[in-house]
Image (cartoon, helix red, strand yellow):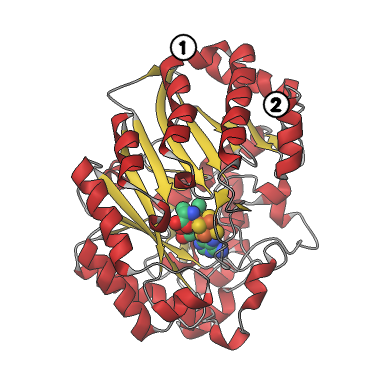
Amino acid sequence: MTDLFAKYDVPAPRYTSYPTVPFWTDSPTTDQWIDHLNKAFAEPSATWSLYFHLPFCETLCTFCACNTVITRDHGREEGYVDLLSIEWNLYLDRVPALTERPLLGVHLGGGTPTFFAKENLERILKPILLRTRIDQDRFEASVEVHPGHTTREQLSMLHELGFTRISIGVQDFDPEVQQLVNRHQPYEVTKSVTDSARELGFKSVNYDLIYGLPRQNPERFRETVEKTIELRPDRIALYSFARVPWIKPAQRSYKDEDLPVGGEKRALYELAREMLGLSGYVEIGMDHFALPDDGMAEAQRKHTLHRNFQGYTERRTTVLLGLGVSAISETPTCFHQNEKAFPVYERRVRSQEIPTLRGHILNEEDQRLREQILQFMTRFEVDLLPAQREDAKTFLQPMIEDELVRVTDHALRLTEKGTPFLRNACMFFDQRLRSQEQRPQVFSQAL
Ligand SMILES: C[S@@+](CC[C@H](N)C(=O)[O-])C[C@H]1O[C@@H](n2cnc3c(N)ncnc32)[C@H](O)[C@@H]1O
Ligand code: SF4
């Protein structure tokens, strides 16, 4: 396997969208984006979900690849609440279906959503929840938290508003690893937030862990996984450290020799996978684990697992509307991203503009490939069109020879041995990437 890890450890997208963001070419104007939204909502069965990007964090974890604003100035909260409110009202004016079609989910991501005081989180959520048509039977609301910046009062308020899922950033329990990535988070703090969430009635607790961080090795990582198992989250996202120093210069602070790469890095995942398997967790998709009675495991069994910009999710809605700086939205035919630079986002929203930065209008081929990639990423198997069969055999020949994938008469299948190489196999469908002679250096390594 070590040779295979060396062979296939190439830059590869994570396929949380297709086309992937660097290959968005056909950008909509704001008017076109609104047309795509209204077209999607015109379907009587249309449903939607809402994502808020809350970018502030008090300190920078040096591994972080998220779009953040690092500040200790909590005076900034109120201004941001106002921006979200203006943005929401801009949409309400132009997309009336937002108050009519069933809202199935809300997700608070970041940054650190719990940077915001309880009152300000409430000011963001309440007016919107009151104006929309929540489908109580299907509604799921979730929040990402940094346990070092989360109070029981915040969680209690969120739970009262209908939040039942919490995702806790853990990353690694080892103090030396934490020191190197500038994230100081004692075990007791993680445990305390986990206990509070459970006592308050949150029904699903997720932990984010990362493998591939500096100085991680099997011995240390075993302890992190043991501690995780002890606290028994319902779900675990075990992310591969995405190293993109050309975008996130803080990642340059690590010494090369401290970073596990290739087979060494993958061994950390395999170790966790084995330990979690023995403790009753089921592997979901590419980098998630869940207890068998958790909704995500059920979604995998029922083939309703979905993947979007937030990674694997239990449910698919027709529209995902993202509010806040850098937030991404999607409809069946269009992607849309808000301005990423905070001052530009702020200026445009204050001048009553939907802050379109870029997006992509999907042509028919994009839409078909997006469905195939989605199916392959969630089920590890996908039907091929007759015209794709020969191409698959040629493009994937090395992976076929290495017994990582199988191409049958009508389908492409990932083998058990091929599980770590899902991103590599997915590149077969990525016509936009394949048609580039020179691939831009934009993606992290596949493994
Ligand atoms: C917005 S943060 C979660 C909430 C909170 N800010 C925190 O850190 O606890 C989203 C998650 O992305 C993951 N993440 C961030 N940068 C990453 C990177 N470079 N590679 C892999 N995962 C990363 C981390 O696991 C993190 O918990
Ligand atoms: S990992 Fe979370 S807390 Fe750390 S910088 Fe990134 S978003 Fe902020």
Left or right position of 185 against 251: left
Q: Residue at x 40, y 70 (%)?
A: 172
Q: Quadrant of the N terminus?
A: bottom left
**Disc 2, SS:** loop
One can see residue 351 in this view: yes
Q: Residues within 10 Å of mark 2 (few under 14, many from 20)?
A: many
Residue at the spot of label 1? 100
Figure disc tally: 2
Residue 95 point in image, percent of width and height: 60, 15
Depth check, front residue: 193 or 270: 193
Front position in the image: 377 or 353: 353
Q: Nearer the viewer, residue 40 or 309?
A: 309
Q: Nearer the viewer, residue 73 or 263?
A: 73
The picture quadrant where one finds residue 191 is bottom left
Mark 2, residue position? 354
Q: Position of residue 99 (x, y in %)?
A: 48, 13
Quick check: can you spot residue 425? no
Residue at point 72% right, 21% down?
352
**Which residue is rendered at x = 37% and y = 35% of the image?**
141
Which residue type does callout 1 highlight? Glu
Of circles 2 and 1, the one toward us is 2
In x, y percent, where is residue 39? 60, 17
Residue 252, image x, y percentages: 67, 75
